[in-house]
Image (cartoon, helix red, strand yellow):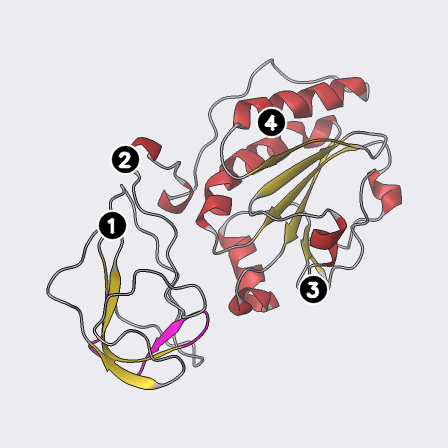
């Protein structure tokens, strides 16, 4: 059965959806967070399903479950929702109440619920989009809905951040700079957690090694540059590199 969608700390793009509103509807629950590149690359497909089937019985509910502290700020989430063109309801799950209700463990995660409120399928991570759409169409037909054409056109990415990865050319994993999850940090002397320190980049970086240069404070989830002229060095093998970067609390833009 569909776990409760209650427990969210708020809902963007309209009031929270209750059981009455979802009765008789096919529901796609999309767990995501706005700085997760895997979530962003799945977004064109969720957007397409919403636009294609919302008049045919499909309800999409986004559940924003933050991976990092800055993703708990409702202003940041609202800005991301607007920038990414997310027009369906998004529940703010800062306390992971909905996440625990689904016993979820992944970003992104899609749960497909039929018109009787039963979870009929799920998919974790990117990919398998054609099969996911087939599931949506099957559940909508079971609920008595008349559907548009047999197959949808290719999903359209809104900018490079949503572009599908080049999996055949990918040899570098997701990498963290904060000391709680950092790996392969190569600056001489290692990281000095929570302290101001002058870092340097070694003469050679092997594949998937990273380093800092300049004066930084490395926290659990991030590294904060203390004066202009710092560097982040990372040797990677992929078509694209995405960096989560933010200005100081003042909100003033930072040249990089």
Q: Is residue 70 left or right of residue 49?
A: left
In percent of width and height, residue 199 lies at 23, 77
Q: Could you say whether the residue bearing mark 1 is in a helix, strand or loop? A: loop
Residue that sits furthest to the front in the current view:
189
**Disc number at residue 236?**
1
**Residue marked by disc 3:** 95
**Residue marked by disc 2:** 169
What residue do we see at 30% from left, 60% from top? Answer: 184
Determine if the magenta segment contains residue 223. Answer: yes
Tell me whether circle 4 and circle 1 mark residues in contact (CB < 8 Å): no
Up-down: is 9 above or below 63? below
Point out the frontmost of discs 3 and 1: 1
Say whether residue 131 is visible: yes
**Disc number at residue 188?**
none
Could you say which quadrant of the image residue 200 lies in? bottom left
Q: Is residue 107 left or right of residue 1?
A: left
In the image, which residues are magenta? Answer: 219-232
In percent of width and height, residue 179 lies at 40, 70
The image quadrant where one finds the C terminus is bottom left
**Residue marked by disc 4:** 132
Q: Is residue 9 left or right of residue 40?
A: right
């Amino acid at each position: 059965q569909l776990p409760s969608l209650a427990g969210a700390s708020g809902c963007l793009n309209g009031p929270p959806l209750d059981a009455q509103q979802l009765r008789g509807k096919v529901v796609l629950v999309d767990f995501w967070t706005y700085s997760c590149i895997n979530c962003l690359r799945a977004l064109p497909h969720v957007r397409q399903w919403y636009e294609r089937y919302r008049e045919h019985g499909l309800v999409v509910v986004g559940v924003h479950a933050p991976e990092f502290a800055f993703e708990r700020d409702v202003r940041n989430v609202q800005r991301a929702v607007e920038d990414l063109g997310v027009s369906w309801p998004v529940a703010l799950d800062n306390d992971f109440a909905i996440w625990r209700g689904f016993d979820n463990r992944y970003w992104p995660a899609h749960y497909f619920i039929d018109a009787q409120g039963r979870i009929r399928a799920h998919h974790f991570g990117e990919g398998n989009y054609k099969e996911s759409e087939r599931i949506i169409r099957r559940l909508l037909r079971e609920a008595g809905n008349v559907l548009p054409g047999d197959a949808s056109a290719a999903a359209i990415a809104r900018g490079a951040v949503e572009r599908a990865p080049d999996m055949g050319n990918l040899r570098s994993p997701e990498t963290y700079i904060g000391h709680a999850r950092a790996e392969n940090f190569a600056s001489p002397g290692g990281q000095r957690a929570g302290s101001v320190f002058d870092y340097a980049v070694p003469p050679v970086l092997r594949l998937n090694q990273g380093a800092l240069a300049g004066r930084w404070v490395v926290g659990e989830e991030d590294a904060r540059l203390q004066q202009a002229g710092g560097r982040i060095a990372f040797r990677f093998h992929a078509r694209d590199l995405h960096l989560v970067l933010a200005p100081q609390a003042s909100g003033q833009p930072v040249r990089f």
